[in-house]
Image (cartoon, helix red, strand yellow):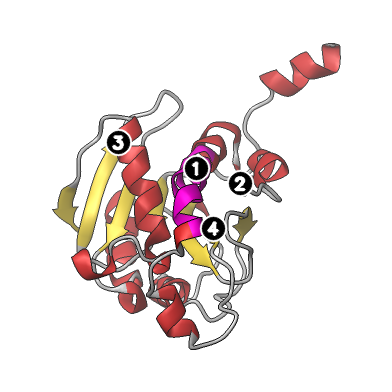
Amino acid sequence: MAAEKVAKQRPPIGPRIRAVVGLGNPGSKYAGTRHNIGFLVLDELVRRHGLSWQSKFKGRWSKWHRPNGDAVLLQPETFMNLSGESVQPMSAFFRVAPPEILVVHDELDLPFGELRLKVGGGHAGHNGLRSIGQQLGGDQRFVRLRVGIGRPVKGDVASYVLGSFLPEEQGWLGQVVDAAADAVERALNDGVLDAMNTVNGTRVC
């Protein structure tokens, strides 16, 4: 019992997240596609907390006032391959360091519905992550929330990520987005390293 009380009282472990970036492509053509899962998660956070979007930094942003420190939410509207052109000016304006940024993105190498938090690393071929790293001066230390979309059984990967979720996936999509939004909140409340212990390996379906 005493150990539980100590664990609850300790401060969050790891860097404090001050900005959350959801990746996707702008426009109705891409709404609801696999590549836009980051947009869906940030839209859910904005809905939950009664926030509103404003236009700046080549994207949409919102200020999330929180008891343990405000956070910026950002949806780049540069198209995926140029996401860093939105993230970098936001980072400079608010003086947010790369380790204080959490990027929510689709992940081919995880099954649909699986979530995983990761600190730093390469881009693994994800052009949004590649652009962010480049525009932040090669600094890859930003945190990622990888939201699994699975790999195509056959066909082109580019067509797959820009395609819509399958009907059987659509039935679970709302719960996946909810779980990912919960994971973002946990990372901000408890710290990334503590959140990893709970989030990593989570699979909604």
Magenta span: predominant SS is helix
Please name which of the two marks, 1 or 3, marks the residue nearer to the observer.
1
Quarter of the figure with residue 116: bottom right
Q: CA distance from mark 2 to mark 1?
A: 7 Å
Which numbered marker is on residue 47?
A: 3
* Mark 4 neighbour class, 10 Å CA radius: few under 14, some 14 to 19, many 20 or more: many
Quarter of the figure with residue 18: top left
- With respect to residue 121, does 94 lie above or below? above
Check disc 1 and give the amino acid type: Gln
Q: Is residue 204 left or right of residue 82?
A: right
Mark before the other along the chain sequence, 1 or 3 = 3
- Point out residue 55 in the picture as x, y percentages from the top left corner: 15, 54
- Tell me where the magenta segment starts and ends, as one range: 168-182
Check disc 2 and give the amino acid type: Val
* Mark 1 neighbour class, 10 Å CA radius: few under 14, some 14 to 19, many 20 or more: some
Mark before the other along the chain sequence, 4 or 1 = 4
- Point out residue 68 in the picture as x, y percentages from the top left corner: 46, 27
Please name which of the two marks, 4 or 2, marks the residue nearer to the observer.
2
- With respect to residue 27, does 200 lie above or below? above
Q: What residue sits right under mark 2 in the picture? A: 204
The answer to whether the residues at label 2 and label 1 have Cβ atoms under 8 Å apart is yes
Secondary structure, mark 4, is strand
Q: What residue sits right under mark 1 in the picture? A: 175
The answer to whether the residues at label 3 and label 2 have Cβ atoms under 8 Å apart is no
Which numbered marker is on residue 44?
A: none
